[in-house]
Image (cartoon, rainbow, N blue to C red):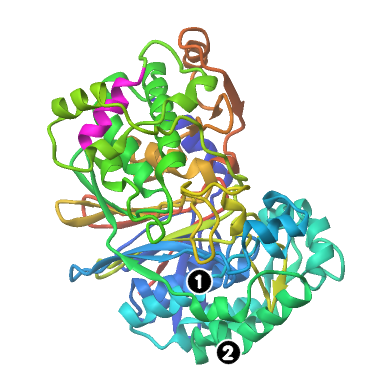
Amino acid sequence: MRRGKWIKRWSAAFLILFVLSSASLAVTVAPVLRSDKGIVAAAHPLAAQAGAEILEKGGNAVDAAIAVSLALGVVEPYASGLGGEGYLVVQMKDGHRFALDFRSTAPKLATYENLEKSGMTLSEAAKTIKGACVPGVPAAIEYVYKEAATMKLEDIALPAIRFAEEGFEVNQTFAGIVADNFDRLQKSAPDFLNEGLPWEEGDIFKNPALAKTIRAFAKEGASLFYRGSIADKIDAYMKKNDGWIRKEDLEAYKVVKRDPLHGHYRGYDIYVPGMPVGGPRLLETLNVLEKFNLSALGWDDPLRLHIMQEAFILTAVDQQAYVGDPLFDPDLPEAGLLNKDYAKTRMMAIDLSQASEPETWKDLVGDPAYFENEESFSKILLQMEFEKEEEKVAALRELVLESPSTTHFSIIDRWGNAVSWTQTISSFFGTACWVDGFFINNELGNFKSAPAPGDPIHMEPGKRPRTNIAPMIIEKDGEVKWVLGSPGASRIVSTLIQIIVDLADFDMSLEEAVKAPKFVGYISYPEIRMEKGYSEETIACLEKIFGHVVKLQEYPDLFFGGPNVVGVEEDGTLIGVGSVRRGGAAAAPEK
């Protein structure tokens, strides 16, 4: 296993460690950090610091998570914020476990009839204020605060308010994303810019409007956004700019508390959100991979990579065909997708000697509905062979716009409570429309571009679109072991699966698993995209023996996501690893 090369390369570039002190608190921030007092990992060092400050003040993991969520909206306004949405999983030490769906919902005016009247395609509308769905972040914060927080919300919000008021130094990622979206920002959010110019690395960015919004939110709660003054401002903004959200949409919004899906892999228990996000595909893929002895093949083995690539494709086509909002279609075959026997049929579809051809992928959709009940595997196979379905999904579902945006953070506190939280505004800067210091999401672009009744992503008012996010908590013998998640659109599931495989099959440390080169095969492109770091012989075998087309990308590459993860080592020490591909960090209280 060629670990040393990429571990050394990454470590040399990020050797930072500093202690931040003010009055009675001190926290440590670093790319990789160990602690026995709680740990936070987030995509920006200041966001990780915000969570650690709350832990240092005696807050629990939920208190810290709220602080990180608010802080990320300040320091990464292009990736998430109060105008966004997401999903989270919480595991409290007392056994209380839940997942919270705070996905955005389509407003009442978001219909195909209105889309046609606009003269736009859905992808075009998604780049305007018409692409906005009703945000869920404020409602999520209020829900988890009432469910499990211990501190006053006004105190939890203080780090985010401080960053917004006092400002912080713009980093390379911030400056680059602003430059890439400068034309959009000039048109729809000129007040966000630096006196009409792009923000550059080293500039000090302040957001007094957002500081005011967060302070009011901490005092008044989510009603400010859904029924109060900010709801009125959003309503007025939408009407003025031909957007589709109205105050009645905001008033109708609700988060949904669910039980997380529970899967198993190599003796580990995995808790991850269900539909309409990436959890079902993640568990389905792991069920397929568990049928193979990957560790016997080796980490850099081309057969191992080929098997994983083919599994990624099989579960991606299943996701496109069967994953949607369960509130609108309760008959979606989620249980079938997770069935271990169904995974056998997907295993049988893998040719161990040859890559599948992209033009055949539309024919690889499986039949998970057969596995919704507890029938025997052999009986189901015979039924599938002789029973003709009236209609079988045989076309590859439409693909939606992919973006490397979104953000994820992970937390374990000193008592063992854990939070895995992914939030997003979809594309970087979402709609690029700015209200009271935050950007509004463009999640509507994740629906089907044309009417398709019965399709899981057919656009309907109140419906949640499908995305790939998959925050998760992994346990071993009833105790939290790892808290994982990542941004990265279609790369989220494959990146997280590779981390799990590297941990469980190849006995890597958490740091090694995060930093190892990643690869992805997905149905929106015909090749395997791989970070540099695999051997030349492995690449040659993938191409010449198995017939894959390989596209190499530099290491590290933001394209493959930015996992921010925490874990518990064998001696009980907590470890946090920030995203190598996005300048993330871990933070911990000093006392």
Q: Is residue 11 left or right of residue 499?
A: right
The amino acid on which the numbered mark 2 sits, given as a three-letter code, is Gly
Q: CA distance from mark 2 to mark 1?
A: 16 Å
Q: Which residue is mark 1?
A: 137
Residue closest to the far front: 390
Tell me which corner region of the image, top left, top right, bottom left or bottom right, holds residue 88.
Answer: bottom left
Name above or below for residue 248 compared with residue 424: below
Q: Which mark is residue 228?
A: 2
**Circle 2 — which element?**
loop
Residue 127 in view in this figure: no
Work out which quarter of the rendered image holds the C terminus and state it.
bottom left
Residue closest to the far bottom: 219
Q: Is residue 423 left or right of residue 591?
A: right
**Magenta-drawn stretch contains 344:** yes
- Between 50 and 491, the residue placed more toward the observer is 491
* Region rendered in magenta: 340-350
Q: Position of residue 180 (x, y in %)?
A: 76, 51
Disc nearest the viewer among 2 and 1: 2
**Circle 1 — which element?**
helix
Residue at horizontal 35 percent and vertical 14 percent from the top: 352
**Magenta-drawn stretch contains 130:** no
Name above or below for residue 327 compared with residue 367: below
Residue closest to the far top: 545
Q: Earlier in the sequence, mark 2 or mark 1?
A: 1
Name above or below for residue 199 compared with residue 451: below
The amino acid on which the numbered mark 1 sits, given as a three-letter code, is Val
Q: Position of residue 38 (x, y in %)?
A: 33, 67
Residue at horizontal 46 percent and vertical 82 percent from the top: 156
Tell me which corner region of the image, top left, top right, bottom left or bottom right, holds residue 391.
Answer: top left
